[in-house]
């Protein structure tokens, strides 16, 4: 499941993030790339010490977002990074590492921080058997997707693309199961909002809770 989320961050949150980005040092992104990824990774990443507090704030905000929680069923955040793409920079086709910092990566996400009109190119492109899908969202919006996807960032031809990328481990490791639970949760809420605690609601609740018992990692 690919999901676009908005309203995760307030204008004040975005101001804080942008201020940290202006004050921190960036280094070549190859330092956090695997052997193959280094051949196609041309971007910059912020100093992890300087951005630690800000990235912790981002985690806290996401953990308060109900749709994020229902879509990801998070066990823990694995890593977050502030990344910058200036003119001529890109990240070619790659799949995120299955294990980062000794933690399994189930879900990846990109939080867009630059206004989409402030740079040209720089689309996040997710590839599967149906073809490529490109994402270039307004500042403050986020796209999350299974870490199994082959993806890339198209070259930035003008301006600056600033994003936070992150990975997390889910308590539901199978993406199909996560999507089923997400759909069930939305159906439960829709039924309750429309009709209250009905017989239909109770059936859906039974299915949702029993699937959680089968699928949740302890």
Image: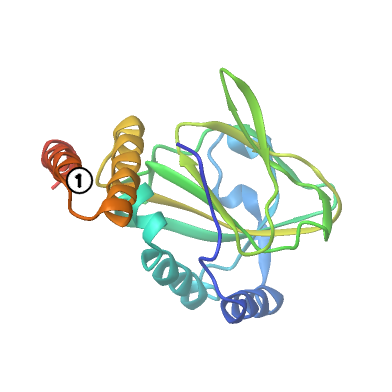
Local crowd at mark 1 within 10 Å, few (<14), some, or many (≥20)?
some
Q: Residue at x 65, y 75 (%)?
A: 24
What x and y, as percent, mark residue 98? 39, 37
For label 1, the residue is 201
Number of numbered discs? 1
**Could you say which quadrant of the image residue 35 lies in?**
top right
**133 relative position to 32: left or right:** right
Q: Residue at x 54, y 70 (%)?
A: 9
What x and y, as percent, mark residue 201? 20, 45
Q: Residue at x 35, y 40 (%)?
A: 183
Q: Is residue 102 visible?
A: no
What x and y, as percent, mark residue 106? 37, 41
Q: Is residue 156 visible?
A: yes
**Could you say which quadrant of the image residue 46 lies in?**
bottom right
Give whichever of 193, 44 is nearer the camera. Answer: 193
Residue 30, relative to residue 66: is it above or below? above
Q: Residue furthest top?
A: 129
């Amino acid at each position: 499941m690919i999901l676009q989320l908005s309203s995760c961050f307030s204008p004040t949150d975005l101001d804080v993030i942008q201020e940290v980005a202006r004050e921190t040092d960036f280094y070549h992104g190859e330092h956090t790339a695997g052997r193959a990824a280094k051949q196609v990774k041309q971007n910059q990443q912020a100093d992890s010490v300087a951005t630690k507090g800000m990235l912790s704030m981002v985690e806290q905000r996401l953990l308060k977002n109900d749709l994020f929680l229902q879509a990801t069923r998070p066990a823990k955040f694995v890593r977050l990074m502030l990344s910058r793409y200036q003119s001529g920079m890109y990240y070619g086709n790659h799949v995120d590492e299955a294990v980062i910092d000794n933690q399994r990566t189930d879900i990846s996400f990109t939080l867009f921080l630059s206004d989409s009109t402030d740079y040209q190119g720089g689309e996040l492109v997710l590839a599967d058997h149906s073809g490529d899908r490109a994402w270039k969202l307004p500042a403050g919006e986020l796209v999350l997707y299974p870490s199994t996807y082959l993806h890339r960032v198209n070259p930035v031809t003008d301006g600056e693309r600033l994003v936070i990328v992150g990975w997390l481990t889910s308590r539901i490791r199978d993406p199909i199961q996560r999507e089923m639970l997400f759909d069930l949760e939305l159906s439960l809420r829709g039924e309750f909002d429309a009709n209250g605690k009905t017989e239909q609601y109770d059936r859906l609740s039974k299915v949702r809770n029993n699937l959680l018992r089968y699928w949740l990692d302890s």
